[in-house]
Image (cartoon, rainbow, N blue to C red):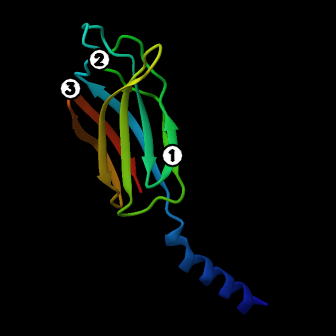
Amino acid sequence: MHALLLCAVALALTLAPSDAAVRVFSLRANGLKGDPAGNPPDPFVKVWCGSSFGGMTEFHKDNSNPSWSASFYFRDCGANDHLTFEVWDKDLNFDDLLGTCVSSVQPGLHQNFACSLQYGTLFYSYEL
């Protein structure tokens, strides 16, 4: 019986690395631009890891330098998968894409990654 239990534990340990998980947190931006009329943006961010959509942040009205409280968890995301961030300006009819960032996931804790957008910079942290 003990041998069977030890085999089950050993099997679980060998399968664990494929069960990767990524946490994305501490999203913020500065210098974002709004519409051509000069209005400040109402920004929000959509987040993916690989083809898995993690969700989106809340939007901040009239804010060129927002920070978001949302965290995103990707259970099946691992090393060398791609994190994708889309920064949007919320509008009444159609939201405007302000920029996209893509980076390759690496093991460990990574804080304050900076990604240049056409107008402004997105910062984020993640851990694998």
Residue in view at x 26 percent, y 22 percent:
32
The numbered disc on residue 119 is 3
Which residue carries the number 1 mark? 53
Q: Quadrant of residue 66?
A: top left
| Sequence-wise first label, 2 or 3 | 2
The numbered disc on residue 64 is 2
Residue in view at x 30 percent, y 48 percent:
102
Q: Disc 3 marks which amino acid?
A: Tyr
Q: CA distance from mark 2 to mark 3?
A: 10 Å
* Left or right: residue 108 compared with residue 76: left
Q: Disc 2 marks which amino acid?
A: Ser
Residue closest to the far right: 1
In the rendered image, residue 82, in percent from the top left (x then y), is placed at: 36, 55
| Sequence-wise first label, 1 or 2 | 1
Q: Nearer the viewer, residue 13 or 89?
A: 89
Q: Nearer the viewer, residue 2 or 104?
A: 104
Q: CA distance from mark 1 to mark 3?
A: 24 Å
Q: Secondary structure at mark 2?
A: loop
Q: Disc 1 marks which amino acid?
A: Phe
